[in-house]
Amino acid sequence: MEEILERIKEWFSKGDESSKDIVLMPWEVKEITDPKGEVIGLLAVNPRMPVRFLATPKEKTIRIAVSLGYKTAYLRGLDRLKAYRTALILNDRLELAKFALRGDEDELVLYVDLDKSSLGEDEFNDALSFLFAAVAAISEKLDLEAEISRQVMESLIAMLQERINKGMSREDLLKFLTKRVGMSEEEASQIVSVLTCSSGKGAESLYS
């Protein structure tokens, strides 16, 4: 196994089971091997989260992708066209991540490529946060099942609430959601209002 994969496996595996922040909770890591038994990637899963992370090394980078199990090969013609069109539009809108198709079932994944030579734990954690928040922002645009979209958004709200409790400012939150994740100001403001309101309704306010 490449040294970078060993480090990523360690970063994924450690954490606090009680945390609601995806970068602070432990993930179960499964090794992906080729026919010769060599490790060519990692799959990270957590039963509390509706997403999976994949880490695959390239020549000079490590690709971190987030998957929702959205397999476009089984979509009908117009539905598949809509999914691809949406992904291409969002590729231009998102600052760091891009969509790609993966595997024989044309699974749509969102990924970032990180420099192997300089990658540290902080940059890795930032990438996970960004990918997860971006998926939450686009899940409804891709017409994912309502329950999946709800789970992703609720998980995002819980993650951001925990960060606010640790000192993240309203300004930083808005900047993260608009500049990094690609949300509109209206969408970001709605989430910020939910997080900073005193009613305690939490993510349910987004679905009322």
Image (cartoon, helix red, strand yellow):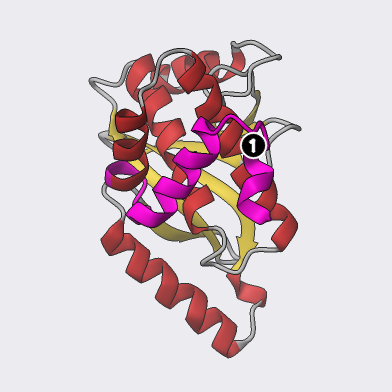
- Provide residue 54's location: percent of width, then percent of height: 53, 39
Q: Name the residue type under label 1.
A: Gly
Is residue 200 on the magenta stretch? yes
Tell me which residue sits at (58%, 29%) in the image. 198
In front of the other: 153 or 15: 153
Residue 62 relative to residue 16: left or right: left
Tell me which residue sits at (37%, 46%) in the image. 181
Q: What element carries label 1?
A: helix
Q: Is residue 168 above or below residue 201?
A: above
> How many numbered marks have been drawn onto this rendered protein structure?
1
**Can I make out residue 152 in this image?**
no
Tell me which residue sits at (48%, 40%) in the image. 193
Residue ranking furthest to the bottom:
78
Occupied quadrant, residue 107: bottom right
- Provide residue 110's location: percent of width, then percent of height: 45, 51
- Provide residue 39's location: percent of width, then percent of height: 54, 30
Tell me which residue sits at (35%, 17%) in the image. 122
In front of the other: 159 or 74: 159
Q: Main secondary structure of the magenta part?
A: helix
Residue 133 relative to residue 33: left or right: left
Q: Which span is picked out in magenta?
A: 179-208
**Can I make out residue 15 in this image?**
yes
- Provide residue 32's location: percent of width, then percent of height: 60, 36
Occupied quadrant, residue 146: bottom right
Q: Is residue 109 above or below residue 197?
A: below
Is residue 68 on the magenta stretch? no
**Which residue carries the number 1 mark?**
202
Classify the position of the C terminus by image quarter: bottom right
In front of the other: 19 or 173: 173
Q: Residues within 10 Å of mark 1 (few under 14, many from 20)?
A: some
In front of the other: 145 or 53: 145
